Image (cartoon, rainbow, N blue to C red):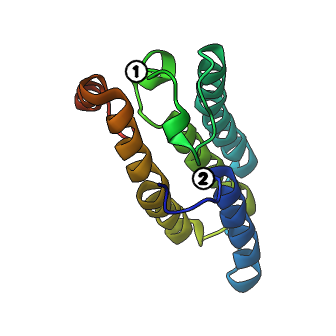
Amino acid sequence: MLKTKIPPPAIALIFIALLYLSTYLIPAFRIDYQTILAVICLVAGFSPAGIAFFQFKKRDTTIDPRKPENSTELVVGGVFKYSRNPMYVGLTMVLVSASLFLGAWSGLVLIPVFILLINHLQILPEEEAMEKLFGEQYAEYCKNVRRWI
């Protein structure tokens, strides 16, 4: 069903590696409080992703993004009241954090590419699966909650 079988966290790791490698090609930037900003973004990334993970576990539904058809419950509370994809928002913030920490100018290009890839390869197929599984309940949820933020 999904267009990729590579888990989104693995895709994010590939992008972090690209950010790191890019600093050898393009001189890194340095700003005041760079590390502090990177840590803030890292916490801002892990927080919604971690909360979402535990919400899935608590409801005993799948967290495997490669098999959304195995979902047993539509989770709409907690962080899912604000984003349909808090785990992907979290991964994106981790990339922002890595870009800041490394001083990688390439983040200006790579992070939007990551968002487009995750949207196309992961989120859209997941949404199709959720619509098949949960029908009108999912359609109503989509009307009230944004895909990202």
Q: Amino acid at mark 2?
A: Val
**Residue reaching furthest to the bottom:** 25
Q: Position of residue 87 (x, y in %)?
A: 57, 38
Foreground: 132 or 74? 132
* Placement of the C terminus among the 4 image quadrants: top left
Q: Secondary structure at mark 1?
A: helix
Circle nearer the N terminus (2, 1): 1
Q: Position of residue 52 (x, y in %)?
A: 58, 26
Which label number is shown at residue 29?
Answer: none
For image coordinates 70% across by 77% down, the residue present is 22
Q: Amino acid at mark 1?
A: Lys
Foreground: 29 or 47? 47
Q: Secondary structure at mark 2?
A: helix
Around disc 2, counting alpha carbons within 10 Å, would you say few (fewer than 14), some (14 to 19), or many (20 or more)? many
Foreground: 143 or 91? 143
| Tag 2–tag 1 contact (CB < 8 Å) | no
For image coordinates 75% across by 48% down, the residue present is 35
Left or right of 145? Residue 112 is right
Foreground: 69 or 26? 69
Q: CA distance from mark 2 to mark 1?
A: 23 Å
Residue located beneath label 2 in the image: 96
For image coordinates 22% across by 30% down, the residue present is 143
Quadrant hosting residue 103: bottom right
Q: Judge whether 22 appears above or below 11 on screen.
A: below
Q: Position of residue 138 (x, y in %)?
A: 31, 28
Which label number is shown at residue 81?
Answer: 1
Asked if residue 99 shows in the view, the reply is no
